[in-house]
Image (cartoon, grey):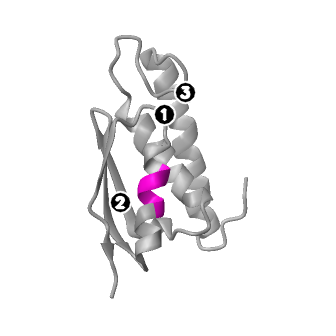
Amino acid sequence: MARLPRFPADLRAGLAGMAVMTAMLCALSGCAAVGEHVRPNGGVDDIAITTAVKARFVDDRRLDASTIEVRSRNGTVRLSGSVRNADEKAGAESIARGVAGVRDVRNDIEVRR
C-alpha cells in the first residue's frame, strides 16, 4: 500500500477494508468485473464507483481527500466539500471522470478563501 502521510494508520486500514468489501459485494451482485463498475443489465454499481473515486483521491497526493465528500447515484458522481484552490477542484473532477462507470460529475466543491 502506498504511504499516505496525511492519514493515520487506522483510517488507511479502514479504506483498505472498504475496498475489499466493495470487491466482495461486486462479485456477489454479479458485476461484470470489479474495475468496470457496470452490471450485466447495464446498470452501474454506485457503491463501487464511490469507493473507486475515494480511493483515487487518497492515492493522489495533490488532493486532501479528507475534505471532499463523494456520492454516486445512477453513475452520476456528486463531489462536495472544500479544497485549497481551483486546481484541486478541477483535479478532483478529472479524477472522478476517469473512473469506469461514471456517466457524469456534479462538482459542488468550494474553494476555500
Q: Is residue 38 above or below residue 67?
A: above
**Depth check: 77 or 58 in front?**
77
Residue 58 left/right relative to 51: right
Amino acid type at mark 1: Ala
Q: Which residue is drawn at the image coordinates 35% and 60% (left, top)? A: 69
Q: Earlier in the sequence, mark 3 or mark 1?
A: 3
Residue 46 higher or lower than 63, as above or below: above
| Residue 102 magenta-highlighted | no
**Residue corresponding to mark 2:** 69
Task: Pick whichever of labels 1 and 2 is earlier in the sequence.
Answer: 2
Residue located at (31% from left, 48% from top): 71
Number of other residues with Cα within 10 Å of mark 3, as a class: few under 14, some 14 to 19, many 20 or more:
many
Mark toward the start of the polypeptide (2 vs 3) = 3
- Residue corresponding to mark 1: 100
**Residue 63 position within the rendered picture, expressed as x and y whole percent measured from the top left:** 52, 68
At x 39% / y 37%, what residue is drawn? 102
Residue 87 in the image: state x and y as whole percent. 46, 71
Task: Work out which quarter of the rendered image holds the C terminus and state it.
Answer: bottom left
Q: Start and end of the magenta stretch?
A: 91-95
Q: Amino acid at mark 2?
A: Glu
Name the residue rendered at 60%, 61% in the picture. 60
Q: Residues within 10 Å of mark 1 (few under 14, many from 20)?
A: some
Q: CA distance from mark 2 to mark 3?
A: 22 Å
Res 61 → quadrant: bottom right
